[in-house]
Structures are given as C-alpha cells and as structure tokens.
Amino acid sequence: MSNHDLTCKHKMARQNGIVQPLLTDLYQITMAYAYWKSGKVNDVAVFDLFFRNNPFQGEFTIFAGLEECLKFLQNFHYSDSDIEYLMQTLPGNIEPEFFAYLKDLTCKDIKLSAIEEGSVVFPRVPLLRVEGPLIIAQLLETTLLTLVNFASLMATNAARYRMVAGKNVSLLEFGLRRAQGPDGGLSASKYAYIGGFDGTSNVLAGKMFNIPVKGTHAHSFVTSFSTLDDIHSVILRHAETQEPCNLLDLATEWRNRVSSVIDISPEEASDGELAALISYAIAFPTGFLALVDTSGLLNFCAVALALNDCGYRAVGIRIDSGDLAYLSVLARETFEQIAEAFKLPWFSKLTIVASNDINEDTILSLNEQGHKIDCFGIGTHLVTCQRQPALGCVYKLVEINGQPRIKLSQDVGKVTIPGHKEAYRLFGADGHALIDLLQRSSEPAPGVGQKVLCRHPFQESKRAYVIPSKVEHLYKVYWKDGRVCIQPKPLLEVRERVQSSLRTLRQDIKRNLNPTPYKVAVSDDLYNFIHDLWLQNAPIGELS
Ligand SMILES: Nc1ncnc2c1ncn2[C@@H]1O[C@H](COP(=O)(O)OP(=O)(O)OP(=O)(O)O)[C@@H](O)[C@H]1O
Ligand SMILES: O=P(O)(O)OC[C@H]1O[C@H](OP(=O)(O)OP(=O)(O)O)[C@H](O)[C@@H]1O
Ligand SMILES: O=C(O)c1cccnc1
Ligand SMILES: [Mg+2]
C-alpha cells in the first residue's frame, strides 16, 4: 500500500464507534427538553470551550482532539434505538413531539471555529467557539469536552517528555496495558504521537492512525527457556550466501571470546537466556533488539556477534531494571570495547532502549547523571498522565440571542469572559509569541506595527502596550452549513505543528521548574465590556 493510500485511510479512520450523541451526560438531554418546552427552539447561542489552568505545573498546553470533534459533528444523529432508549428512560410526561424533534436533529446549523490542532494554547483563550441553535449547541457540551480534554492533556504530556528527552532520543509509547481502559489506551497512543513520540507498541493504533509500531520482547520470552536444549533449531541461513550457520555454536564460541574482553565470566551468564536470545535472533535476524536484564549483556553480545557471522547486524538492547544511567553507560562501554577488539565499528552504535516506570523527572535526572540511552520506552506515567490526570476544559455560554452572558463567581479566575470574541497571537520582533489578545468580534483586528493596549482581564492596574511584528488570528471556521470547511491535517502534520508552535514560545515559558507564565490579555474595549456587564449582573448587597 502506498503512503498516499495510508493517508487517505487515516482520514477515514474513526477514533471510536462509541463517540455518538448518547455519549453525554443525562442533563444535556433533560435541559434540551426543558429548553424546548420553554420555547427556546429558535434561540441562538455562543459557547466557548476553554481551560483555566495549564497542566503539569507548566505554562503551556497543546490543543488536540479537533479532528475527532469534527467527525462527531459530521455524524451527529440520534438513531431509532437511541430515541427508543430515551423514550424509555426519560420521565413519562415528555411530549412525543420532542422525540420527533430529536430524531431530526443534526449539526447543520452549527458553526464551529477553532484554533489549529497541535497549537500551543493558554488559559482562558477559547479553543473552540460553537455558535448555533441553543439546544443543539448545548447537546454538544459533554462530548466535545471529553474529546478535547484528554487529547490535549496527553499531547501536552507527550510534548513535555519530548522536551526533556531532547530531539536526538527516540520515544516509544508502551502504555496500553496501563491505560485507562481500551479507549484511553487508543487515544493515548494517538496523542502521544502528536505530542512528539516516535512510535507505539499499540498495534491497533498503528493500523488505525498510521503510527509506526515498534517493540522488543518481554521477560516471559526469556524465562520460557531454561537450558540450551530448549532451542528448537540452531540454524540460520547466511544473509547473502544462504549457507546454513549454527548460531548456537557461533554464540557459544563468541561468549568465551567476548568474556575475556569485557571481563564477565561465561559462568555468570544464564544458558536459558542464551537459548532465548538465539531463538529470538533466528526469528528476527534483521531486527534483533533484545531485553537483557542486568546480567544479559554477555549473552547479547555473543548472539549479536554470531549474527554478524551470518551477515546480519543486531539492533540493540532494552534495559528494564536497575540503575538505568549506570547500566546504559556500562552497556555502551562494552559495545565500544567489542567494536574496538573485533574491528566492528557499528557495534559501538547499537541502540540502547530503557524502560521501567520512567517519567519526566526520571529523564531529567538521567540527563544530569549522564547516560547513553538512545530510546525511552514509556508507559504508565505517560498514558495515565499520572502527574495530573485531567485538564479542566469547560464549556460556557457567552452569548444568547446576541446578548452577552457572564458567569460570575466568588473566585475571579472562574468568571467567564462574555460575548462573541476573537483571539489574536501577537509576536515580537524576534519571532517569539508575546501575548494572546482577546477582543470583541466587533473590534478591528490588531495591526502589525500598531500599538495596542493589552489588559489583564481582571486586574485593572496590569496593562501593557504591545507593537506586534506579526499578528495571527487564532480562529478558523472548521464546520459550517453541515460540512467540514477545512479538512483536518494528517497526524504527521499535526505532530509537526506541535513542534513548530512550541518553537514560537520563549524558553523560560517552557522550562520545567518555575516556568514564566505566558500572558493572555483582553483589549481595552473588552475589558470595559466585561466589567460593565459584571456590575450590571452583580446584585448590590444590603448592610443591616
Ligand atoms: N539512574 C537513575 N536515576 C533516577 N532514577 C532511576 C535511575 N535508574 C532507574 N531509575 C528509576 O528508578 C525506578 C526503579 O524502580 P524499581 O526499584 O522498582 O526497579 P528495579 O528494582 O530496578 O526493577 P524491577 O522492575 O525489575 O523491580 C524506576 O522508576 C526507574 O525508572
Ligand atoms: O514501566 P512503564 O513506563 O509502564 O513501561 C512499560 C512497562 O511494561 C513492561 O513491563 P511490565 O511493567 O508489564 O512488567 P515489569 O515491570 O515486570 O517489566 C515493560 O517492561 C515496561 O517496564
Ligand atoms: O515492546 C516492548 O518492549 C514493550 C511493549 C509494551 C510494554 N513494554 C515493553
Ligand atoms: Mg514495570
């Protein structure tokens, strides 16, 4: 199959058949009925989907999940069995006409504007703006949130791992077994790739999303062999001459020769392990990447050198326990000694994969210690987002029938920014993003080279003038008149977008410890609009 076919297939692939209109909270449907009963069928609403705090004690987030949101809008339709289920489940007094109304509901009158998937995004700047009939816009809330929240959290987590690992180390996602269920696992694989991982062990994710699938083998493969007699066949044909080679004889001989070079006695090496590695090498002579726990280095080198006699180059090892810094350095030194002793320069470059409960802090610590790892295999901490298991995206009504709405709260951070708004990213002369600016949609866009007053949305004294060298309007219309207006990009392009978008952020905003917050501001006009509305809506108390 050509790459082109695969790309087309990717576009068709649906994340998951469970993403459908009933994948929502009951209250969306009960509200829909109450709206319908209250004559709000023709009301027109604007909702903003945004988060209030960046995850992982960081100062940036990667926006992901848009493609799945578009597929959801495209397929939004209550089936006969959905309607039947709702009829049985909702209270008996619900009028049958409501079900007839639901039956015909689609997203044809919805307009969805969004930031490009894979962009860095910041608190309070809406990621999605949903406009259209109140009832349908309301019905989308929970599903859009579930599609954006985990996707963005995962992509952000993965991007953070990529940042600490650096660009020269490969990152593999090994998390399916530990993920929050099958759907969590599938989403984790997809968004880890977007965030900067190079591959996954999850085969279905590979098939559905065209992500490279990679892997080694488990401990059980080694422990299933006890003695050299467990080897089924010792013969491997030479890669070029096709001559039969006895891999056991070759490996045993090499084990003796190597042991004197690297100072590990053959008695310390297990025969069961040697049997396992020979068997694995015979099965995968071109892809010999073996799990060598602490003791297996000698056996691995012996089999790799035997494979070399048969015309094949081993790939490398995986270390899955012990001190990963120390063991990777030891392994690299061993490979270098062998490369030197047997005049096989490529041997010094064998791949060293490390796994075992790795997280951002482990990688930072390994970097400090100095290590020789080429690839990290990361599962649990990555896919469960153990450090912060949820991103708090919310979906708030900001306008109804052209009238702005504000949600007040004792907690100023939770007050919503009302009205139909646009978001702009203003860049400085050095190419870095300076600030995100929210404006009322009726205002003219900020211009390059023109001074614009940027205000903190809630703190009157915090303001700054900015003269942008570049202005990026953050929203594009992705869905309108019942169709997708901008085709989602293939995963690989979204993955590239993540890295190019991150490059526009100053280093201090991305650093791991105490990063500098990126500024999100409102225009002077929007500031006054928010605060006038706030006063209008806040009841005046009475002292007695
Ligand atoms: N040099 C290192 N610096 C910091 N952390 C490390 C280093 N080497 C390993 N780690 C981490 O320390 C932890 C070691 O965990 P643990 O003690 O459970 O594993 P182990 O005993 O080596 O292996 P096993 O899984 O076989 O029990 C892992 O989270 C691993 O990622
Ligand atoms: O450690 P994670 O980041 O989740 O990465 C995936 C882990 O899954 C595998 O083994 P598993 O943990 O199932 O068994 P083990 O701990 O005995 O190796 C693998 O050996 C890794 O250790
Ligand atoms: O291929 C591997 O090495 C792998 C896959 C899943 C989990 N742990 C390791
Ligand atoms: Mg483990």
Image: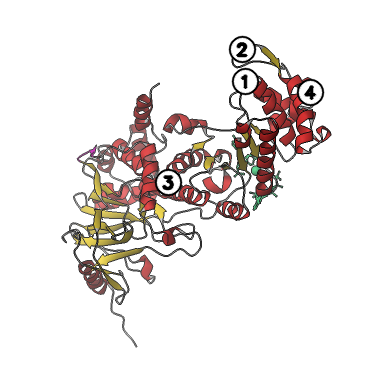
The crowding category of the residue bearing disc 1, from other C-alpha atoms within 10 Å (few below 14, some 14 to 19, many at least 20), is some
Residue projecting furthest to the right:
267
User: Would you say residue 274 sits in the magenta stretch?
Assistant: no
- Say which label, 3 or 1, has the lower sequence index: 3
Is 287 placed left or right of 486 in the picture? right
**The N terminus lies in quadrant:** top left
**The C terminus lies in quadrant:** bottom left
Q: Name the residue under label 3.
A: 151
Which mark lies nearer to you, 4 or 2? 2
For residue 433, above or below residue 373: below
Q: What is the distance, in whole Å, between disc 4 and disc 2 at their CAs?
A: 27 Å
Q: What is the distance, in whole Å, between disc 1 and disc 2 at their CAs?
A: 9 Å
Q: Name the residue under label 4.
A: 228
Q: Which mark is residue 241?
A: 2
For residue 71, above or below residue 518: above
Which mark lies nearer to you, 2 or 3? 2
Q: What is the distance, in whole Å, between disc 3 and disc 1 at their CAs?
A: 44 Å
Is 117 placed left or right of 204 in the picture? left
Q: What is the distance, in whole Å, between disc 4 and disc 3 at their CAs?
A: 48 Å
Q: Residue 311 carries which label?
A: 1
